[in-house]
Structures are given as structure tokens and as C-alpha cells.
Amino acid sequence: MAKIAPVPEEAVLEDVRLKAPEVSLEQAAKLGGVAGIVAVFVSANGMVQAFAERDIISGILSMGYALLFLVPLIIAYLAAREPPVLEGFEAPQKGPRNVVAGLIVGAITGLFLVLFVLLASAVNLRRVFINISPQLLDLLTFGQGSGGLVLLAAGSLLMGAAGGLTQLLEAKWRRALWGAVAWTLLIGLLEVIVAQLFRGLGLNVLAPFFYAGTGGLTPVGAAIVFVIAFLYYWAVVPKVNQWQHAYAQMPAERQRSVRLSAVVAAVIVVAVTPQVLGPFVSEVLDLVGIFLLMGLGLNIVVGFAGLLDLGYVAFFAVGAYTTAILTSPASPRWSPEMSFWAALPFVILAAALAGIIVGTPVLRMRGDYLAIVTLGFGEIARLLLLSDWLRPVFGGAQGILKIPNLSIGPIVFRTPVDMFYPIVGFCLLAAYVSWKLKNSRIGRAWMAMREDEQVAEAMGVDIVEIKLKAFIVGAVIASFGGALFAVKIGSVFPHSFSLLVSITVLVLVIVGGLGSIPGVVVGTLALVGLPELLREFQEYRLLAYGVLLILMMLYRPEGLLPTKQWVRELHEEELMQDAWLKMEEDRRRAQAQAQTSQGDLPPAQPEEA
Amino acid sequence: MALLEVRSISKDFGGLRAIDHLDFHVEEGEIVSVIGPNGAGKTTLFNLITGIFQPDEGEIIFDGHNLVGLRPDEITRLGLARTFQTVRLFFNMTVLENVMVGLHGRTHAGILDTILSLPRQREEEEFIRQQAIDALSFFGTRLIGFRLNQPAFVLSYANRRRLEIARAMATGAKLLLLDEPTAGMNPRETLELTELIGRLRDEKGYTIVLIEHDMRVVKGVSDRVVVLDYGRKIAEGTYEEVAHNERVLEAYLGRKAVRSA
Ligand SMILES: Nc1ncnc2c1ncn2[C@@H]1O[C@H](COP(=O)(O)OP(=O)(O)OP(=O)(O)O)[C@@H](O)[C@H]1O
Ligand SMILES: [Mg+2]
């Protein structure tokens, strides 16, 4: 047996820390350019003008100005952020550099906007860009003519400075400030919901106090919302940790009662939500719920397992059509007229089968090939449903009508308000399943496969098995969405299952932050719910999806198209870590050279042996 | 019988013979170092043994099983795990999760067990967690504590290498194949790892095959050294024997002389 060399004293090195990387002003200038282009773009494509018709704070802030000035604010905030702390580096210091970075962004954005206005007033651009109207220019200069240009530039600069300044705040204050701004904007936009909430709760007297009636919050209302949100983030949110800690310390019995009361409270909230919010908002929530269900399912396939499926709508269609055939008396070929619940096991079976059918041919494919093949599957599913050949089974373009309402015993779910409950039920089920699987050996195998398929396999993960499992679970969850969609609408048509559904669901998952369950919930509320509530958003929905997908490609490409090289080292953090490693390596090499001057095969220190 | 026996395997990469009729064996409880100049075929040998590539000819017998034709995951489940020359962790997963993945092949809970949260599934999860922490504890305090829940990409190079070894240990393997485990480490870390490799065998009972460029490590731990050049075995024996072998010196120094000429 060989002897083990002991660690000699002199080999012990002192712990060297490298200087923290600074906020890069060059990067800020680049981001400023981006902010300028974005601000000009949203002006030129008509968003600012369209949004200007809706007030967030009555008479003070319209949605148009909010959009325009949020651009420099947010980008300045990002530009002024210090690079992350890594092993081997000192913690970065905050200082004037943060603010300067923000100012740079604000100045460049302002410059772009001013140049845009000057250009547009000198040359008639309307032939090409129909949205660049005199009203828009009027809006951008605050109705002040050329004097307004100064205001425009100053406003942009101010926003940049504000974005930079918030970086100087302690985390607690910063979170409170941003949280309060976000909530004020949101409550201002969601008048439909909040006003209905007041009405539903019998607090009608409060409505005129908060909302001006002509759209938007009253200034007093806005101030109240801001203060409440601020206090919430400042005083309540930091306590959550303590509460969690306190909860963990409690005896098991009290934990159980705390849990029980939380569940009871949640049940009550869910029970009254659709009643209070009324049929219109409930209809929107139902739609959100169905998309959420699909989002949770696709999150397993794309977010956890990293399998980019662009034909996910096929599973949704399988759920809807299986339900329609099995429950509707008008089903053209067979009509067993089962109840929804009796049909459900068959829906699950059909979806699992569909998962295997889609999954098997793509077992050895990765990234972009997988995306294209699944895209094909999605279209094939729609075309089969539409085809004359299968018209006797699926009813062709006429689809299948007369799908009976969902019922449990004597309770029938007819209205959007009723349907809210089963939809929430299935969403909770899907969320539970996702969460449970994520923290299990199967979920970890999915994530390992997403990160590096070859290594996952070398660590004992059966790639074939785990891929099929991802497709099956994803398919079954989507089929629940389809089944609920069928009974909610009462009919199914092929045109409901277009590529756009796949894309929408994919965007939800991506925006939610691939793999994050709460992220999918927020993503769905924002991207499906908001456009339903605010007409202005409808028109720019696809634009927003496109932009979000591009951002995702830029910042987390391995989530979208996982290939080996991309997975390895793409994150900025990792690049910095590498810089550190390289310096370490150089130092090591210099030392090694000092110690040994032999060739490639140094006969290890002769004195020890 | 030897734990691992490689019989006359060859591997061509489009005309380039990376491994040429190589015979190679490892006894249970041994630490064998594989050395050789760059491009000698060391990593390719590991890739062949672990099923990432299939040999063009020859047999690989491990613990009574012929590995040729098996998939990498099947081979790992037979008790053979590796690390990679270019560190290949699951960078966006936590330190603990990385090691927990290593236990995948030894555990069984399926989708329904997990969704229904059956007692056997929960016990298995606990087992996985415990085993993973055990494997990480082998490296002292470097990878446990607050590190457990950090993503792997924040780790230093040395810690990444350690984590790779922990992940391989967690597969429950008998034989570990370590591909240049000290590459990129400073002298102190290298010495420490040398010692650890010895302890892996002495305390944990692993059999180890090691590809290594740092001769102090090779000298420090190896029972036997195998030297490859152009995919062939050119020498074999104790470190001392190999270090004074004419052909070995020629392979290293001769090529160097040619290169610098
Ligand atoms: N996948 C592959 N395709 C084509 N050629 C390959 C492949 N893998 C290795 N090779 C070639 O096979 C030869 C042996 O490579 P290998 O990586 O096994 O060398 P090594 O001994 O590990 O070298 P190093 O010390 O640099 O790691 C090299 O010439 C290499 O270019
Ligand atoms: Mg190699």
C-alpha cells in the first residue's frame, strides 16, 4: 500500500480575497441605449398614446406616461445594481457610482426621446409609422411645444437618478419602495376588480373615495394605497421569516392547529372570491385558471425537465375531446353519455397515451429538434380534429356540442361563478403534484437532465424513463385543463386548439421563471388576466410575448434550448467566477514553477519517500 | 478475479485510433493511476468503461458483468461511477441536490408513490438526504452547512471538484473513476485531495482509478501506475518502476523535445 503524503506546513496559503467588481459605467451606457430604443419604440408603435387614455392616478399620471417613464426607471435600477458576490471576492461597496450609472441611463434615454421628437416634428414619418401622430408628439412634450422637450429630458433624467438612488437604500427600504410603487400602479389599473370588490363587500361608500370615476385612483386614494403597501413591505414582510421560525419552534400540536386555521382561512377566501367579484371577473378568473393548469403542466415538461414542447396544446385538445366524446349526447360516433367524473379516468388514460406517443419519437432529441417535432405534433392534432376523414368521430369544423355541465351529486356548476370552484380545485391539485414531484427523486432527475443529459445518465438516471414520465405528467395535467374547458364552454371546436395556445402557455412558464411554481401563477395572472381586463393590453399582447421570449433567450437560454455548451458556463456570475479561477490558476502555476523546475514528470520531492 | 478487467479494447475516431488493443485491470481495493501525455487516450478509456462510447472491439468485465452494450445509467447502477475532466456539475441545482441525484439509481419511488406521499417514499427521501449529507461530510465542513442549499455555480473550482467526487460516491459505487481530480487546484488543495483519495480507499473501501497529471499525487497514492501513449499501454508497475522506465521518459520528454523543436 502506498503512503499518503502529509500536508506540509509551508503549503498553507493565506486566504486571498479579490477586490469586488464595480458597477460598470460602460454597461450602464449600453443599457441606456437599450432604454432609449425601448422608450422610442413604445412611443412610435402607439402604445404610449393608446395607454394615455387610461389614468392610473386621475389627472396626474396616465398609463401612457407610466409606461414611458418606467423604462428609464427600471433599466437605471438594473444598470446601477452591483454584480453579485462570489466566493473569493469581497462584498461590493455602495457609492456614488450606483447613482452615476442610473443618471447615465436616464440621460441617454432622454436624449433618444428628444431626438425622436425633433425628428418626428421635422420630417413626416406617418407614411411609414402610422402611430407617430401630432397627438403623440403633443403628449411627449406635455403640450408645451419645444419647451416640453426640456421637461421630457428632465423627467427621464430624474427617473434614471431615482432608479440609481434606490440602489443605495438598504434592502428593506428598497423593497418597500418598489413594492409600494408597483401596488399603486396595479390598484390604479385594476379599477374593475377593486370597485367590484367594494361593491361585493358592501363597502360601496369607499369607492368614490379611492376612484375618481373618470378612471384611475384619486390622488388621496393613491397616497393611501402607497402608504399601506409601503408599510406592508416595510413592517410585515420582514417578519415572515420570524413567523416561519416561530412556527418551526411550536409544538407539533399547535403547528397542526395553525395549519388548520390557515387552511380554513384559505377555503373561506376561495369560497367567497367569485361571489364577491361577480360574473365578469369570475369569467376572467376561470380562463386564468385553465391557463394556469396548462402552465403548471408545461412547467414540468419545460421548466423541470428542460424539454421544449411547442405542441403542448395537443394534450389540452386530447382532454377536451375525450371529455366531449364521452359525455356529450351529440357526439357523432359514440355517445356513452358518461358523467364528467366517470369520464375522468379515461381522460387521464388518453392523455398518458398521448404523452407516450409524443414522447417516444423524441427520446433521443434535444433542444431545437425537439421543439420542431413537438410543434409538428401540435399541428397534426389540430388538423386531425379538423379533417374530413375523422369527421365521423370528432365532428370536423363543427366540433362537438351539448357537453353537459359539470355536477357533483345535486350540485350543478352552470355559471362562471360556479365553475370557479372546480377549476381552483384542479389548479391546487396540479400545484401540489408539481411541488411534490419537484422535491423528489423524479424531480431532481428531471432537473439534472435539463442541466446536462449525459452527466445525468452517467449518474444513474434512466433518461428514457424520466423523459416519458415528464411527458406523461405534463400531458395529464393539460388534459384536466382541456376537460374543464370543454364543460365550461359546453362545446369543443378544433380552432380552439391553435398554435397560439401553445405559445401563450409557453410564455407563461417562461415569464414565471422556468421551474418556479409561484412564478407560473403570477405569470398567468399578468399575461392572461390583465389583457382580459384591460382592452389596451389586448392589442399589444403578442408584442409583449415576443419581447419576453427574446429576453428569455438572452438571459436564460439554457432554459429554452438546453444544449451542453450553454448549460456549462453562460451566466455572468460564472464568467466572473472563471476569471477568479484563472487568476488562482496562474498563481498556482507560478508557485509550482518556483517549487519544481523539472519537466512534465517531476519525480516528486526527493526528500520525502 | 479482478474487479474490473478491460480486455483488448479499441476505439477509432474516424481514422484516429484513440485506444488500441488495450488490456487493463483493477483489483478490488487498489488505487491505480492512469498517466500519459495529452491525447494519450486516458479520458477515452473512462468514456468506454462508463458506456459514454462503445468500444469497436474487446470486452469490459466489471464484477462479473460485461459492460459492453450497456447504457451509462445501467453501468453506474452496477457500481461504477466517475467524475469529469471538465467539471460537469448540475450548476443550477443546489450542492445537496447535486449529490442527491447521485442516489437516483439506488432508489425507487415512482410518480404515484410521490404524489400520494406514501410512508415508504418519505422514508426513502430521508434516506437520500442522509446519504447525500454523509457523502458531503467526507470533505469536512467545506460543502455542508450553508453551502448545502447554494447553487453549484457559486462554488470555487476546488469545491466543484470535491462536489463531483461526492456525487460519484453517492451512487453507491464500488469503483470510482476520477478524471484529473486535482486539475486547477492550488498545492495545498492538491495535497489535501491526495490524502482524501487515500482515505476514500482506506476508510470507505472504494477501489479507485485515477487519471492524473500531477506526479506528486500519483506518487502519493498509487499502488500501481499504468502509462498510456497513443492509446497503448507502454508501461505498468509501481511509481518508482514507471518513473525510471525508458519508454515512459521518452513518451513524455521525447514528445516535449519534438514539440519545442
Ligand atoms: N469524441 C471524440 N471525437 C473525436 N476524437 C476524440 C473524441 N474524444 C477524444 N478524441 C481524440 O482521442 C484522442 C484521445 O483523447 P483523450 O481525451 O482520451 O486524451 P487524454 O489522454 O484524456 O488527454 P488529456 O490529458 O489532454 O485529457 C485525442 O486525440 C482526442 O482528440
Ligand atoms: Mg483527458
Image (tube, coloured by chain):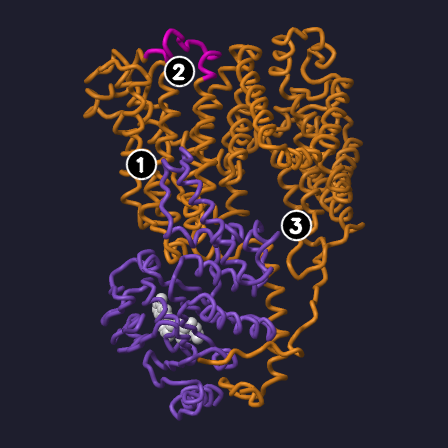
Q: Secondary structure at mark 3?
A: helix
For ligand 1, the image quadrant comes to bottom left
B226 relative to A279, above or below: below
Q: Is residue A535 visible?
A: no
Q: Earlier in the sequence, mark 2 or mark 3?
A: 3
Where does the N terminus of chain A fall, quadrant-wise? bottom left
Q: CA distance from mark 2 to mark 1?
A: 24 Å
Q: Residue A64's quadrant in the figure?
A: top right
**Which chain can be seen in orange?**
A
- Taking the spot 40% from the left edge, 15% from the top edge, the residue there is A488
Q: Amino acid at mark 1?
A: Gly
Q: Are marks 3 and 1 in contact (CB under 8 Å)?
A: no
Q: Which mark is residue A355?
A: 1
B158 relative to A554, above or below: below
Q: Amino acid at mark 3?
A: Lys
Q: Which is more toward the observer, B63 or B50?
A: B63
Tell me the subunit letter for badge 2: A
Ligand 1 within 8 angstroms of badge 3 C-beta: no
Q: Which is more toward the observer, A478 or A164?
A: A478
**Which chain can be seen in purple?**
B
Whether residue A497 is in magenta: the answer is no
Whether residue A411 is in magenta: the answer is yes
Give the labeled residue for mark 2. Answer: A488
Instruction: Indicate left or right for A314 with B258 as reference.
Output: left
Give the labeled residue for mark 3. Answer: A30
Ligand 1 within 8 angstroms of badge 2 C-beta: no
B220 relative to A504, above or below: below
Instruction: Report the magenta residues as a range.
Output: A404-421
